[in-house]
Image (cartoon, rainbow, N blue to C red):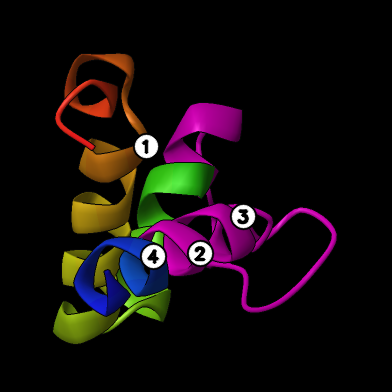
Amino acid sequence: TYYIIAPSEASANLARYDGVKYGFRSDNPDNLLSMYKKTRATGFGAEVKRRIMLGTYTLSAGYYDAY
């Protein structure tokens, strides 16, 4: 259950770090979507991105019935 709960919590908690109000912000964004993409691409490392993706998958509606 750790491998399900931990990434799910990480995904939910790290969603607020978008560069608008909290955390690192990428330089010279073209628009809001570009700022989100650039900030998360440069601000999060490979392991953090992996945990976010796994947590998002776990929390998705299609995976819910498996657990």
From this view, report whether residue 25 is shown above or below residue 34.
below
Tell me the SS state at disc 2. helix
Measure how far apart labels 3 and 1 are at the Cα level: 19 Å
User: Does residue 31 appear in this view?
Assistant: no
Callout 3: helix, strand or loop?
loop
Question: Looking at the image, which is closer to me, 26 or 47?
Answer: 47
What residue is at 60 percent from the left and 32 percent from the top?
32
> Of discs 3 and 4, which sits in the foreground?
4
Amino acid residing under circle 3: Asp
Distance of mark 3 from mark 4, alpha carbons?
A: 22 Å
Q: Which mark is residue 59?
A: 1
Q: Residue furthest top?
A: 62
The CA span between labels 1 and 4 is 9 Å
> In the rendering, at what x and y percent does residue 46 appear?
15, 80
Tags 4 and 2 touching, CB below 8 Å? yes
Q: Earlier in the sequence, mark 1 or mark 4?
A: 4
Q: Nearer the viewer, residue 62 or 50?
A: 62
Q: Amino acid at mark 4?
A: Ile
**Mark 3, residue position:** 18
Is residue 9 within the magenta segment?
yes
User: How many labels, in total?
Assistant: 4
Q: What residue is shown at x 29% (from left), y 77% (from top)?
A: 2
Amino acid type at image mark 2: Glu
Q: Which residue is mark 2?
A: 9
* Residue 36 locus on image (x, y percent): 50, 45
Looking at the image, is mark 3 or mark 1 earlier in the sequence?
A: 3
Amino acid under disc 1: Leu
Q: Which residue is mark 4?
A: 5
Q: How far is mark 2 from mark 3, CA to CA?
A: 16 Å
User: Upstream in the sequence, badge 3 or badge 4?
Assistant: 4
